[in-house]
Image (cartoon, rainbow, N blue to C red):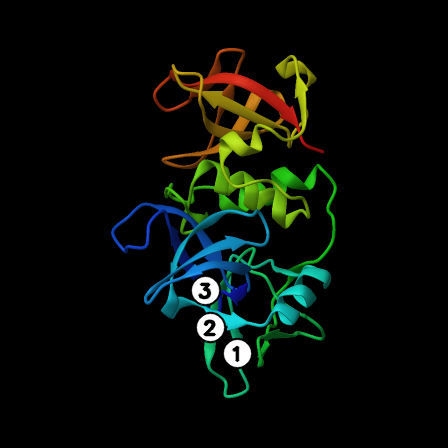
Amino acid sequence: MQYGICNLSIIPVRIEPNDTTEMVTQLLFGEYFKVLEKRKKWSRIRNAFDNYEGWIDNKQYEEISEEIYSNIKKSPTNLSAELIDFVTDKNGVFSTVLIGSNLPFYQNKNLLINNTSFHYEGEIFDRLLPKDSLIEIAFKFLNSPYLWGGKSPFGIDCSGFTQMVYKLCGYKLLRDASQQATQGEVLSFIEESEPGDLAFFDNNEGEIIHVGIIMKDNYIIHAHGKVRIDMIDHSGIFNLDSQTHSHKLRVIKKII
């Protein structure tokens, strides 16, 4: 088995080994993974955080040893808390990092990617935050444009948004909305929900296709065109701009 780590700010993970195919998710700086299959130009990887699989360009990651992979997995998690910041190597060369980037072996404002040491001055997330922090963190992504497979303030999809918000607060969600819907405890009514609970929505075939984070007073924050705030009722999401229901409610889940 081979292993790797993302040493760029953000890279696409694709459904097939081709630049023109669908981007299914992204890797942020410091995210590490197993290499399941390596070809001349592409590698099929499994992300350590959520076990999500896809293809990445061989030029866009750095190989690491099994020992380093294991040591990162065992070490405390430190994530960048700034919407956008940078790390610098010993030569003063900048690398951009986005919110939620992993900072391996972080100590005294220094971190390590393979054998390269970097310095990071920004704020970090390094502990489990209370449930009421979820909405506060979600607001950091407000008005981020929708991007299928995206995980950053510069482009994010509905499940990438919920996953990143929970991740920054110290909790683990799976990657896709349909996968996240298998987690947590089912709530029977909206009235039972609390801010931070997840609402899932399906299509006419009954497939879970959307997810958002419930707020107080029957509001929901979700990624639809952009990360936005709308109303939620027993039918689903009521879009405040179009004054119509945009998504059909399927289930509400309490994750924490």
Looking at the picture, does residue 122 appear above or below residue 149?
below
**3 vs 1, front mark:** 3
Q: What element carries label 2?
A: strand
Give neighbour class at mark 1: few <14, some 14-19, many 20+ (Cα, 10 Å): some
**Residue 225 place in picture, x, y as percent:** 36, 35
Label 3 sits on residue: 9
What's the residue type where badge 1 is placed? Thr
Callout 1 secondary element: strand
Q: Residue at x 65, y 13 (%)?
A: 188
Residue carrying label 1 = 88
- Confirm or deny contact between disc 2 and disc 3 (CB under 8 A): yes
Quadrant for the C terminus in the image: top right
The crowding category of the residue bearing disc 2, from other C-alpha atoms within 10 Å (few below 14, some 14 to 19, many at least 20), is some
Task: Between residue 35 and residue 47, name the one nearer to us.
Answer: 35
Amino acid found under the numbered disc labelled 2:
Ser
Callout 1 touching callout 2 (CB < 8 Å): yes
Residue 43 spot, x, y in % from top left = 40, 60
Q: Which residue is painted at 67% across and 64% down in the image?
A: 70
Q: Is residue 76 visible?
A: no
Q: What amino acid is labelled 3 in the image? A: Ser
- What's the residue at 45%, 64% (across, down)? 9
Task: State the residue position of label 2.
Answer: 95
- Whether residue 9 appears in this view of the structure is yes
Please provide percent x and percent y for residue 106: 67, 70
